[in-house]
Every structure is written in C-alpha cells, then in structure tokens.
Amino acid sequence: MSTAWSVTRRRHRLGSTEVVYLALLGLLALSAVLVAASGGNLFSQANLVDMLTRSSLLGMVAVGQTFVILSGSLDLSVGYVVAWSSLVAATTMAGDPARVPLGIAAALGVAALVGLANGTVITRLRVSPFIATLGVGLIIKGYLDTQYKGPAGEVPASFQAFGYSRIGPLPVSAIVMLALVAAGAVVLARTRLGHHMFAVGGSQDVARLSGIRTHRTVISAHVLSALMAGVAGVLIASRFGTGSALVYTAGYDLNSIAAVVLGGTLLAGGRGSVIGTAGGVLILGVIDTVFNILQVDPFFKDVLRGVIIIVAVAVYARRQIDPSSRRTRFPAGRTAGGEAR
Amino acid sequence: MTRPVRRLGALHPLTPGGHWAAYLILVLIFVAVFWLNPSFAEPASLMAFVKKAAPLVVLAVGQYFVIVNGEFDLSVGSLVGAQVVIAAKMLNGEESRTWPVLAFMIVFGLLIGLVNGLVTTVLRVPSFITTIGMMFVLYGAIRLWTGGAPTGALSVAFRQVGRGGFASPVGQFQIPWALVVVVVVAVLAVSLMRRPFGRTLVATGDNPRAAEFSGVHHAWVTTRAFLLSGFLATVAAVLIGGYAGVTAQVGAGLEFTAITAVVLGGVVLGGGRGTVPAAIAGALTLEALFTLFNQLSVPSTLRPTVQGAIIIAAVAFAALPRRHRSRPVSGAVAPEGREPLPAAG
C-alpha cells in the first residue's frame, strides 16, 4: 500500500482545511477594503511583517498543540513552558555569544522534559489530560514565581538580532514558524508517528488493538508540543533580550487551542491538520493587525475572537453532520465478499 | 450472578478509586489545620473560613452539573467577573436599586447559560470551545462597556450577603449569610440530583446514546445544566462581590479553580460519575489547603506548585485500578487495567 494512497485519502477527509483558507481569503479581502477605506494599504510591507510577526509565536505553539489535540489529548501547560524556556535560554546565555547554542539546547531540553512529564502523568498515572497539564502548569508557575522576581538573564546582541531581523521581506521568526508548520505537516502525512497520532486520536482502543503503542504516541505528541513551546520561548528571549516569567499571562494555552480548533482540527482528536492550524493562526493574526491599523478598541477584538471561534466550529460541526461529507468506507464494487442487498 | 466480594468490608470505599477518597483527603487536611492551629476550631474562625470558601463551593456545585453531564463550563470565571462589574456599575452605590439589579443579574446569568447550552447542543460546538469563546466575549464586552476599569460601587445591602451575618442563637459568634446560601444551594442541589432530572443528567453524561435511546431529550437536559451553572455563577458573584469588593481582576482563573475543586472531589471529567457532596468536599478541600498554606507560611508564590502536585496526586490516586474487588465472572466487564485514556477536553 503506497503512501500516496493514504495521503490522498486523508486530504479527501479534511475538507475543513480548504474552508479555513477560504475564510482567510475572505477575511483578507474584507480587511483590505476596510483598511483601504480608512486610507491605508493592508498589503504594505510594514503591515505584512506586522501580521507575520504577531502570528509567528502563537503559530509555533499551535503547531505543537495540533499534535496533542490530534492524539486525543490537550496541553494547558504551554504558556508556562514558553515562559520557562525563555528564562532558561536567557540565563544560560548570560550575554555570552559563545553560549548561544548551549542556551538554546538547555531551553529545549527543559521543554522536552516538561512534555515528557505531561505525557507520563497522562498515560502512566491515567490522569485526564486537562488536569494533568493544568497541574504541571501550576507546578511550573509556582517555581517561576518563586525563583524569578523579574526579568532574568541576558541574550547577547548577536542573538537578539535573530528576533527582529528579516530575510528579504520575511521576519526570521515567521520563517521559523513556517518551517515548523512544514515539518509538522510532513510528520503527520509521511511518518509512522504522524499516522499513529491520527489513529490514537480517532480511537485509542482500536489503535491499541491494531498494535500501536498508544502510550508512546501520546507521550511523543506531548514532547513535541512542549518542544514547539520551547522554540517560541527562545524566540521571545531573543526578541526581549531577556527572559521573563510574565510571558505566561499572554494566554498561549487557550489561544493556541482556539487556533487549532479554528483550523478545523477536531477537539476530540483523530482529525485535523497542521496546515489548517496555520490558517487558524493567520486568521487571528489578520484580525489583530487590522484592528491595530484601524485603532479599534482592543477589547472589541476579544469579543470578535470569541464569536469567530464559536461560529467557525459551528460551521465545521454542521459539515460533519451533513451525510454527504461522510467518507464512504466500503464503496460499492470494492467489498471482497459482496454483501447481499 | 455472584455478588461482589468485599474483602475490606466497610473500609473498601477508601481504597484507590473508591468514592470516599475525597472525604478522606478533606478530613486529613482539616486534621492538619486543627493540629497546627487549635484556635481554628473555634466557631468564629470556622465561620470566617465558611465565608471565604462559600463562593468556590457554589461555583463548584454549578460546575458539577455541567461536568457530570460530560461537558465543561470555562466561562464561569469571566461570568463572575462580568456580574460583579455589572452590579457595581448599575448599583452605583444606591441602596434602592439592590433588588432590581439582583433580578437583572439573575436574568443575565441565565441568559449566558442558555446561550452556552444552545450553542453546545443545537450548533454542536464542543462545550470546551463554546465556553472559551464565551469567556473571550464576556471579558472583552465588559471592558468595552466600562472602558477598561470597573466603575461605580456596590450597595451596602448587596454586600451583606457576602460579608454580613446574624448573631447565633447559641454562643458568641455570627452566622454568616454565606453559610445560609451554601446550605440552601447544597440541599437544593442534592435533592435535584435525586429527582428524575438529576438521574437523567448523570445518565446522559455516562452514555449519551443509551440515554437518548431511553427517551432522554439530550439537548434540553444539557442546556438546563448550563442554565444551572450560569445561575450559580451569579450567586457566587454576589458572594464574591460582597466579600472581596470590585476589582478588574475579580473572577480571573476561577473556572480552573472550580473545575479543580470538582475533580478533586472525585467527579470524573467526561461525565457520569460523582456526587454533589463530593464536589462540595472538593471545594472545601481546596480552600482548606489554602488555609493550611497560610498556617505553614508557605511562600505565596510557591502555592501553585503544591496545588498542582496535589491535584495530580489526588486524581492519579482515584484513577488507580481497583484490585480488591472480585467481579462477576460473566466476562461482560472489561478489565479495568486496560481502561482507555480519559477523554481530552
């Protein structure tokens, strides 16, 4: 059985990804008109860069969150992982350019350990993902609040440039995000781990009976999610020039879940895509940028964001109820025995 | 059919997975509190504890209805915040408006519950997402309405419920109104769960399909659970507003504390398991834990760490496979050691 077969099959199932990008295009058109009406240009380089920069950090976290949600789990600890890894990166670097690789490695290592802890608590101790990751998040929060009273560490100037500089029109952080999205899409479509994630999220029992080590898959998803949050933390450190515990107040946990679901991934797991998540993140990023350009009250943005998330998921839910969108599992003519009708 | 053999007799409910574990933790923490500070057992200190714990108990009962039905309500924290801010702005310190404003708040709370319930059931949006969306909407709308910071003031009569009380017929202490509210809410909730509605609520949470096949109107049952949650969040808002006053931060993060409390009481996320008294015990355990932290003078910054570790430990303990009960040999029951992971979200 070739890989191409399963890929086309999956693409057929994930019609919601196209809906996400159609919505994004519609939103971009509407926003362009609104911005043009107030005498601006949405597609000016400054605005595009702003849009991508705003989306990039949430995008990284959301890619990891996609793996976790796809596997039928949930990660509420990502905000704290972002904060912690930014601190570890900045304090390890301590302003010394030679220690930059060490700082990045330490930050990612810490993040991976948190992911391992999340996955282990969920699979071995059989605590529900909601409570497990909330609990681990609280443990980290307490440690951060006690250990760091304010910003700590220093990122050398050479690495600070990483947070702001651009290659052509693209900010480096956006390139990192796009690379992670691409890598995530490849993992889901081409690797054994990715296929296992779909299987485990679809039905843990069926996956186990088919010979998949379900615990290992869930733990891997959590490690990947924490690693992505770790990358976001390192980028925040390079952008701020220092590590800060207060990053966890930015709401990466709920916002990343919202972006994943907005991207058409089923909250219950088993269906979804990283590409869709990227679309969801970009939708939120465009709204942010447009509201910023039009100088609308930021609180109105929260209201709109809430409404958009609910409406989007309601639309996806309707598509899934629609019988014509259901995949025919046993098309006529292909059944081996040929059922009597 | 063989009857299950109970080797541990009366102690069986206390073993891992037993439904009395929640009460055991509560008793242990209270013993520790009393041991460290015997004066805490005096009626006055206990009443002060009740006043502090009352809002969380009421919120936990509201969250219980939703969770036992297999859903989530993450909007209660921002609903509490919104209600307190609404009360302050509409009252503006005037006593005569107290009752009309209370009536408006109840209608508003029920309305939010209705919207949550209908979006979840009719539009088939998972309640986790519905209520996150509602959380964003309420957070933004309230700040949009007040221009960022809460304005106005609560009336004296309004604040009585949360911080006032009446003289006890025996002894030299005050019985807080909050205790009356908690007892009334608890009694009503327990009796509601014994009525057909309560049975249906749990049955739907345990197995929605089976419940529907036996004639349950799933959508309406779930919507009523959200209505109850919205109403009880309003009651909690009145208690918190009275006890702590009006700030922009009020209610922030309360949804997670309430869910933690309910889960600590042994109510299973995903529905179908747990009781109202257990949810109340969970809320009291959490508040007692905070009191214990005070007495041990745990640095306030370290409290989340201990809280997180204890939640995980408590839930892991409750999830341990039960070994001491032999099952009917019919083979219809799957061995519990191979239970699937708890459902996400």
Image: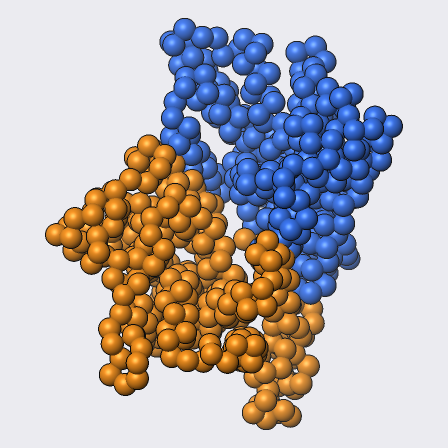
B293, above or below A293, in the image: below
Q: Is residue B3 visible?
A: no
Q: Which residue occupies the extreme left position in the image?
A: B96
Query: Considering the image in quadrants, where does the N terminus of chain B appear?
Result: bottom right
x, y percent for residue B312: 63, 63
Instruction: Describe residue B182's horizontal placement relative to residue B101 as left or right.
Output: right
- Which chain is blue in the rendering? A
Camera-nearest residue between B179 and A261: B179
B166, above or below B158, in the image: below
B42, above or below B176, in the image: below
**Residue located 30% across and 36% down the image:** B146
Q: Colour of chain B?
A: orange
Quadrant of residue A165 within the rendered picture: top right
| Rendering colour mode | by chain
Camera-nearest residue between A77 and B246: B246
Camera-nearest residue between A54 and B124: A54
